[in-house]
Amino acid sequence: MRKIDKLERKYEKLFEPWDKKREELVNGLREPEESELGLLKELEAPIESAKSTDIDVEGMKGKKGFPGFWAKAMKNNPVITTYLKDFDMPILESVTDIRSEKTENNSYRIIFKFAPNEYFANTELVKTMVMDKIDDQICKETIGTEIEWKEGKNVTVKVTKKKQKNKKTKVVREVTKSEDVESFFNFFKSRSAPDADEEDEKLIEEIENDMDIAEEIADALIPQALLYYMDLAVDYGHGEDADKVDSEDSEEETSHKPKAKKSKAETKKECKQ
């Protein structure tokens, strides 16, 4: 195991108690402590980039649970929100926790936990990002949990029924047609990167999207979940906030700037084996 992998796993372990506390708060297993409420008060005032905040910190005293916590946090993230559809939101309301875990060889996985819901039987959906052993910017494969959709509840597929009449026999039959639909839950589908000599533009784009979502969840959403829920997060590298940061830090060393995102052409090349 590389030294960087060992270091990342070490810090992942250090954050586990904090993640557990957040999970307990979100799901109403305990009430917020005075120290936690005090921290929220400190967070509210200084962040001028907040678009809107309707969080009543005083009203949180004695409150148990924050329904729709993760759905709201995801909606407020500027990257993830671009992959969300209106029909995804009721399902995401049942998310109880989101975690990320390092695996081996630069790879990692995103874990979504769900309360019982009317859409599928799974209580946990996992997406594993299998990265190249040498270059962790190259995605070799993505492995997702197969969603056990309940009848008529699969939001990733549009089912249409049409009656057809046989010209000779005059017999009428019903034909069912399924069509893929854009949905956040396509993220949990498994995909393998095409060979270097293959040109599968659709597959490459799907893997790009998977990487985009997984990286944003692991690097931004999970560590800043509360700030996204409150719509107070400063998103370095995104939109207006990025322009402010670039302007303020223009005199600092370039090594302190966020890593530039690669061009689509470079990313497509990396998605191939």
Image (cartoon, helix red, strand yellow):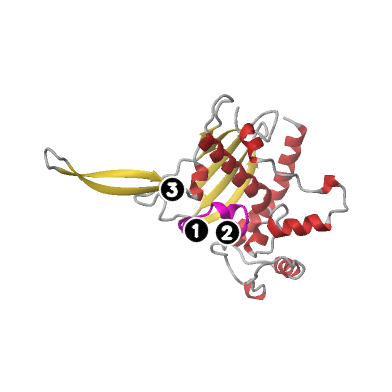
Q: CA distance from mark 2 to mark 1?
A: 9 Å
Q: Earlier in the sequence, mark 3 or mark 2?
A: 2
Which dot, 3 or 2, sits closer to the camera?
A: 3
Circle 1 — which element? Answer: helix
Residue 77: give x, y in percent of width and height: 62, 56
Which numbered dot is residue 181?
3
Residue 99 vertical placement versus 77 (above, below): above
Residue at label 2? 75
Residue 32, percent from left and from top = 65, 66
Q: Is residue 175 magenta?
A: no
- Residues tagged 3 and 1 counted as in contact (Cβ below 8 A): no
Residue under the point 70% across and 56% down: 235
Q: Pointer 1: what residue? A: 89
**C-alpha gap between disc 3 and disc 1:** 15 Å
- Residue situated furthest top in the rendering: 197
From the viewer's perspective, is 56 left or right of 245? left
Q: Please, what is the dominant secondary structure of the magenta stretch?
A: helix
Residue 181 versus residue 78 in the image, above or below = above
Q: The N terminus appears in which quarter of the rendering? A: top right
Q: In terms of image quadrants, where is residue 23?
A: bottom right
Q: Going by the image, does 112 lie left or right of 35?
A: left
